Image (spheres, helix red, strand yellow):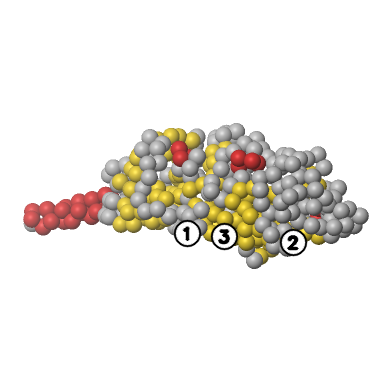
């Protein structure tokens, strides 16, 4: 074989190795979120990377284009302990399992997100999570009485439009959740309803949300009753949010005990008489620190029975909206 032919064969092998070892530009998709990547061609498992893969994490507000300064990034690599990186750029290895708690440093403004991926590429990998949503701190609820008058005021005294029930009567109150634009509850929410167990048939308490019967679930242990005779029913509702403001209708139904005539007496959520009290609490993602190693989860409360959405320790500040349906 001529020397020139041998050199050509060597050059072909070297070029192939560099192509597969270093990769080419492309796209990567993680949990439905697509970000531009550079030098990250998927390579066979038996071919090692010439240089260690490096991730460059980013995130985008779902409803506002352009990245936001997300501060420190918290992640777990291969099921280990949670680690913090100041800019989201760090080395990994091909085959690593990476979990990221997106927007952890911005949790007073945004819902956190749980982002999971397996490293299968070489080279630098800029990737972005594109579904971060702001907390819906501007949400309100308006309920209406039996003659479709808005239940209003801050104290719900007798002079306001309350709901008339009567002995053994029932309630079917129409309400509206009014959200601000570009916010919402990206993972869904629960509606916790509390009422007087001596006045109402607790099993008849129901919720219809946006045209469909809501599914009942166990009330989180983090919820503390407002009254000694109170009881609760909790319902799960689907995710919501939009580029524009939303109005979501829902109906609350309850039935008084046969001999009971629900009456006035609402003073506050902790002293509500025969009113029905409601809290809308969104699901959020969080770091569960009281396990070894720490874990990233999504839910309504942590292992200590503390609300995690949107980070409040009580039902009052964990709720994105609360309301009362007083009676007379």
Instruction: Let me know if residue 55 appears in the view.
Output: no
Tell which tag, 2 or 3, sits nearer the viewer: 2
Q: Which residue does the image show at 43% across and 54% down from the upper left?
A: 62
Closest to the observer: 87 or 80?
Answer: 87
User: Mark on residue 318?
Assistant: none
Question: How far apart, in angstroms, are the residues tagged by discs 3 and 1?
Answer: 10 Å
The Cα atoms of the two marked residues, 2 and 3, are separated by 20 Å
The percent position of residue 133, horizontal first and vertical second, equals: 48, 50
How many residues crowd mark 2 within 10 Å: few (<14), some (14–19), many (20+)?
A: some
Point out the residue furthest to the front here: 159
Q: Nearer the viewer, residue 119 or 6?
A: 119
Marked residue nearer the N-terminal end (2 or 3): 2
Give the residue number, with chain letter if any, for mark 3.
247
Kindly identify which residue carries mark 2: 146
Secondary structure under tag 3 reads: strand
Residue ID for mark 1: 244
Q: Residue furthest bottom?
A: 211
- Residue 159 visible in this rendered orientation of the protein: yes
- Give the residue drawn at x 40%, y 53%: 64
């Amino acid at each position: 074989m001529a020397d020139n032919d041998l050199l050509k064969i060597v050059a072909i092998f070297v070029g192939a190795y560099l192509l597969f070892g270093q990769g080419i530009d492309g796209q990567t998709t993680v949990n439905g979120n697509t970000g531009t990547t550079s030098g990250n061609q998927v390579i066979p498992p038996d071919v090692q990377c010439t240089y260690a893969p490096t991730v460059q994490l980013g995130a985008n507000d779902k409803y506002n284009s352009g990245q936001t300064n997300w501060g420190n990034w918290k992640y777990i690599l291969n099921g280990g302990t949670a680690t913090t990186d100041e800019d989201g750029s760090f080395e990994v290895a091909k085959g690593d399992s990476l979990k990221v708690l997106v927007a952890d440093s911005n949790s007073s403004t945004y819902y956190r997100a749980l982002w999971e991926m397996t490293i299968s590429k070489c080279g630098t990998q800029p990737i972005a999570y594109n579904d971060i949503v702001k907390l819906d701190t501007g949400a309100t609820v308006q309920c209406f009485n039996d003659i479709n008058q808005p239940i209003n005021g801050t104290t719900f005294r007798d002079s306001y439009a309350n709901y008339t029930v009567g002995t053994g009567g029932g309630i079917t109150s129409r309400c509206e959740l009014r959200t601000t634009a570009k916010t919402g509850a990206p993972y869904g929410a629960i509606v916790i309803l509390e009422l007087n167990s001596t006045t109402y048939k607790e099993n008849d308490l129901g919720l219809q949300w946006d045209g469909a019967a809501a599914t009942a679930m166990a009330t989180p242990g983090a919820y503390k009753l407002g009254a000694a005779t109170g009881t609760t029913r909790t319902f799960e509702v689907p995710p919501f949010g939009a580029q524009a403001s939303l109005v979501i209708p829902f109906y609350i139904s309850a039935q008084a005990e046969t001999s009971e005539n629900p009456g006035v007496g609402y003073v506050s959520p902790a002293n509500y008489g025969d009113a029905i009290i409601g809290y809308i609490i969104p699901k959020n993602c969080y770091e569960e620190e009281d396990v070894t190693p720490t874990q990233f989860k999504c839910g309504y409360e942590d292992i200590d029975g503390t609300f995690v959405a949107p980070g409040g320790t009580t039902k009052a500040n964990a709720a994105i909206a609360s309301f009362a349906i007083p009676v007379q």
